[in-house]
Amino acid sequence: MERFTELTILQPEDKEGIEEPRTLGDELVEGKKRLYIESYGCQMNFSDSEIVAAVMRNAGFATTSSADEADLIFLNTCAIRDNAEQKVRNRLKQLNTLKKKKPELMVGMLGCMAERLKTKLLEEEQIVDIVAGPDAYRDIPKLVEEAETGQKAVNVFLSREETYADIAPIRLNSNGVTAFISIMRGCDNMCSFCVVPFTRGRERSRDPHSIVREAEQLFNDGYREVTLLGQNVDSYKWESENGEERVNFAHLLERVALVHPDLRVRFSTSHPKDITDEVLHTMAKYDNICNYIHLPAQSGNSRILKLMNRTYDREWYLGKIDRIRAILGDDCGISHDMISGFCSETEDEHQDSLTLMEYARFDYGYMFAYSERPGTLAAKKYADDVPEDVKKRRLNEIIALQQRMSLERNQRHIGKVQRVLVEGTSKRSEDDLFGRNDQNKVVVFPRGNHQKGEYVNVLVTDCTAATLLGTVINEQ
């Protein structure tokens, strides 16, 4: 039985990348070896795969969306929960059948799972030829050359400087409207349940000028929304070598917003201890900075938060919610992460998570049962002593509450007009389009004559807990 159960409230048009792996598209280039990349886990992994594709293009590879056509297969992996790793191991079993038919096929493991297991992965998974951690992607062409000689190739060195700022990502799996921009790498927060500091290293921020240039290029190429990515974007800080220029996250957010009024700006993820009033006021100042914040809580109980080493307590978190509402208004979209059944959590402490959710009135959330990860502080210091059935029951209570609140929050939009950026065709009907509003909520509406990349005004007429439904109107 799996040690971890994951259930997530998501907009129906946004499931890829959370539950399902994402692949790159096809490059129509003859005479080149073919690279197939499958990405699992977080948005950072998807962004990293675009960097790997750029590195490998320079090494003479073209991408393919079919594993059957590939000469080289990379799985860009996640290690944050046990079931994420089990998905990858199951996928390797499937690829083993392909490799038996095609012995020259090379298989590589990238990302956090590769970093966590290192050379042990080569012992456990004989199919794997290449292992590369998140800071080793420039070295992949050399690793491929080494693997082509029949040797196993590994680089899991973690850097204190690498940001890949000079590499233009290959956005072959993009909808052509929205794109990720990685602004920093690594994490200095040592949350006791989390492997990220061990798999992605220490925080380092990317040169803001390169970030703005990337945003400008994306806008010129027709993109109309960028999401600034980092494990903890609010701790972004950069200083020029002479010390004359210092940029924090609020400054960076403003610079990207000033690229063009029609370029929407989002960011993820925020840490409650670091998001400042300066950031909130910057969001309020610019209409094209989306009125939405992902603010992981993880628990609503102060004792559990201390065990998690989250560095804030319940009151601090609720105070941050109050500041968001005061500066950005009650309609600001707020989502969360919540873990059920962390080590020693009591029933009363679980109830504290539910009451925190009630107070915050989250629009949606990502909700998990606790999964002990080897090497984390929690695994070393605390017993994973909450029974699995209790974890699952508490998780189901958290999900039920969030579904109710998501519906109530969406009902607030009925009868109101939303400005929606069209992202594509609805998965449920070719006759409908979908996009997102300012609060990151999916809006579905009849196609009409509208196209991807347009902004349209949609009158919301109905909703579910996950989706707003409406019709396009022409405002005078």
Image (cartoon, rainbow, N blue to C red):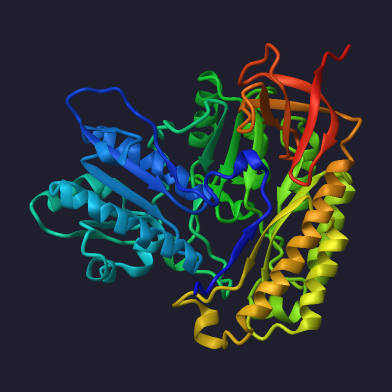
Quarter residue 131 falls in: bottom left
Q: What residue appears at the point 72 percent right and 35 percent down from the top-left corner?
A: 289
For the point 70% across and 23% down, the residue is 261
Which residue corresponds to the image point at 73% horizontal and 61% vertical from the top-left?
399
Q: In the rendered view, tell whether residue 180 sits above or below residue 137.
A: above
84 to 469, vertically: above or below: below
- Residue 462 vs residue 472, the one in the foreground: 462
Can residue 201 be seen from the camera position used here?
A: no
Q: Where is residue 272 in the image (x, y as percent from the top left)?
A: 71, 61
Q: Residue furthest left?
A: 149
**Image quadrant where residue 87 sits:** bottom left
At which x and y percent is residue 81?
A: 51, 66
Q: Quadrant of residue 430?
A: top right
Report whether 397 appears left or right of 459. Answer: left
Q: Which of 309 and 448 is in front in this view?
A: 448
Q: How many marks?
A: 0
In the displayed structure, 317 sits above or below 9; it is: below
Q: Which of 129/205 is in front?
A: 129
446 sits to left or right of 208: right
Residue 228 visible somewhere in the drawing: yes
x, y percent for residue 374 = 45, 77
Instruction: Decide which of 388, 452 is in the foreground and name it.
Output: 388
Q: Horizontal and vertical percent for residue 231?
A: 55, 55
Q: Quadrant of the C terminus?
A: top right
